[in-house]
Amino acid sequence: MVLSAAAAKQIQRENAAIARGLKRQDPELLDRLIETYQHRLMRYLMFLTGKREVAEDLFQETWIRVLRRGSQYNGQARFDTWIFTIARNLVIDLSRKRTMASLDEMREGGDDERPFEIVEDGPSPLEQFQGRENAAEVATVILKLEPSYREVLTLRFHEELSLEEIAAVTRAPLSTVKSRLYRGLAALKPELLALRSRANAEAR
């Protein structure tokens, strides 16, 4: 997502204001942040863990970390990138305790490092399908993917983070992010085409 200079400066001002508020532990600011980011954060955790109860527990813990460690946020990075990083680290910590579905692979970056180039001209199959009112079906398909793939797809297409921002959240090389995005889209394509066929059949 390419921002205009004015929009980028506005985001910088907002990030700086958030940083100042967190350093003061401003309770009103925290309430506003929870209201603004709760749905995005919960969605991210749901896609990452695949389990609502686990996601809800981690959601609460993420905001506790934000409150306790708010002074560490300096406003240089986008706030959503920072909070997704906190949430992801909590998922990894939990995975070590519960050996949850190969999440260690997300941390170790065991993908093929070949630098796939994502074709940018035209929407991806996922973006095309998101225009339809079938978010639940798409979410079900994404949850079938490996955790590392569904995380990158969620950050890219739901949260609209850039590839560089995704690399910062996941602490993975840009080439690894591109690889995971390419492979995730490749794995999604047949499932999405099948969904589209069923939707077209039902519409007749």
Image (cartoon, rainbow, N blue to C red):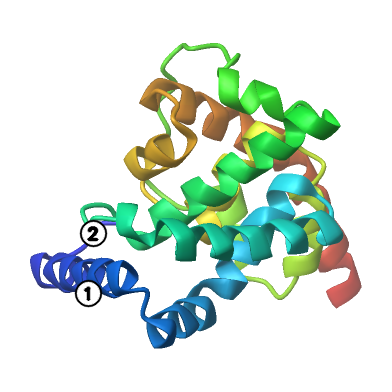
In the rendered view, does 100 fall on the left or right side of 155? Answer: right
Q: Are marks 2 and 1 in contact (CB under 8 Å)?
A: yes
Q: Amino acid at mark 2?
A: Gly
Instruction: Provide residue 186's location: percent of width, then percent of height.
Output: 65, 32
Quarter of image, res 39? bottom right
Q: Amino acid at mark 1?
A: Ala
Label count reads 2
Residue occupying image coordinates x 57% and y 67% = 40
Instruction: Provide residue 103's location: percent of width, then percent of height.
Output: 71, 30
Residue beneath label 2, please? Answer: 75
In the rendered view, does 29 fall on the left or right side of 36? Answer: left
In the rendered view, does 148 fall on the left or right side of 11? Answer: right
Residue beneath label 1, please? Answer: 17
Q: Earlier in the sequence, mark 2 or mark 1?
A: 1
**Number of other residues with Cα within 10 Å of mark 2, as a class: few under 14, some 14 to 19, many 20 or more:** some
- In depth, the one of 194 and 165 nearer the eye is 165
Residue occupying image coordinates x 24% and y 57% = 2
- In depth, the one of 88 and 149 nearer the eye is 88
Circle 2 — which element? loop
